[in-house]
Amino acid sequence: MALSIFSPVPDWASSVVYSKYTIVKYLGKIYYALVDHTSGGTFDTSKWGGHITDPFGSVISNEDTTDSTRPHFFFTPSYGNTVNSEPRTKITQFGEGYQQRIPESINNTLLKISVVFENRTAKEATAILHFLNARNGSEAFLYTPPEPYATMRLFACFNWNQQSQFLNNININAEFTEVPV
């Protein structure tokens, strides 16, 4: 069966052999296998990625006030990522060259990170692209950027592209934009 980010996602089931990056649905959320394993009688979150408890404590859904999980981008990018910081400031120019500079808003220094995933298998690339496509550019997700910014933050991804070099050698480029909590 061909891998596709548009294929229906099967429900998680017990006593099934799952390979790394298999995509399943459990309690209405999408998860990605972190390791090869055979599922037990209960869903083991240590073997699945894609959702974690929101460290910022926000409730995501208006319908379910008990849901405190948020999508989590756990895939490890290749080296060569670019981080752009462009603080938004208001500058007031006074006479004789004097200036006053103040932050434009509370969250005036949000990161933009260009992440690169090189030489990925078709299965891993499908999982990465499925995650991004499922967010549809509108749903924010948790991501820990590389050092020295290595603190979990909230991001959205508005654009990404994929290049197939040859069989099981796929490159993905994406731009993550930090969003205020």
Image: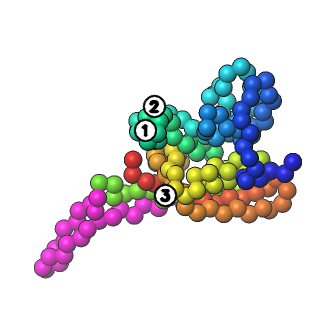
Q: Which mark is residue 164?
A: none
Residue 115, horizontal then vertical, whole percent: 59, 56
Residue appearing at x 49%, y 57% in the figure: 177
Could you classify mark 2 by the number of other residues whose Cα lies within 10 Å: few (under 14), some (14-19), or many (20 or more)? few
Which residue is identified by label 2?
Answer: 66
Query: Number of callouts in the render?
Result: 3
Could you classify mark 3 by the number of other residues whose Cα lies within 10 Å: few (under 14), some (14-19), or many (20 or more)? many
Disc 2 marks a residue whose amino acid type is Thr
* Left or right for 48, reference 104: right
Residue 164, horizontal then vertical, whole percent: 78, 61
* CB contact under 8 Å: marks 2 and 1: yes
| Residue 1 position (above or below residue 103) | above
* Left or right for 29, reference 162: left
Instruction: Report the mark closest to the observer, 2 or 3.
Output: 2
Which residue occupies the extreme left position in the image?
95
Residue 54 is at least partly visible in this image:
no
Q: Which residues are magenta?
A: 80-105
Q: Does the magenta portion include 90? A: yes
When asked about the image quadrant of residue 99, the answer is bottom left
Residue appearing at x 63%, y 55% in the figure: 133
User: Gap between marks 2 and 1, in whole Å?
Assistant: 7 Å
Could you classify mark 1 by the number of other residues whose Cα lies within 10 Å: few (under 14), some (14-19), or many (20 or more)? some
Residue appearing at x 45%, y 31% in the figure: 66
* Residue toward you, 45 or 60: 60
Instruction: Report the mark closest to the observer, 1 or 3.
Output: 1
Residue 176, horizontal then vertical, whole percent: 53, 56
* Left or right for 163, reference 177: right
Disc 3 marks a residue whose amino acid type is Thr
* CB contact under 8 Å: marks 2 and 3: no
Which residue is identified by label 1?
Answer: 59
Which residue is identified by label 3?
Answer: 177
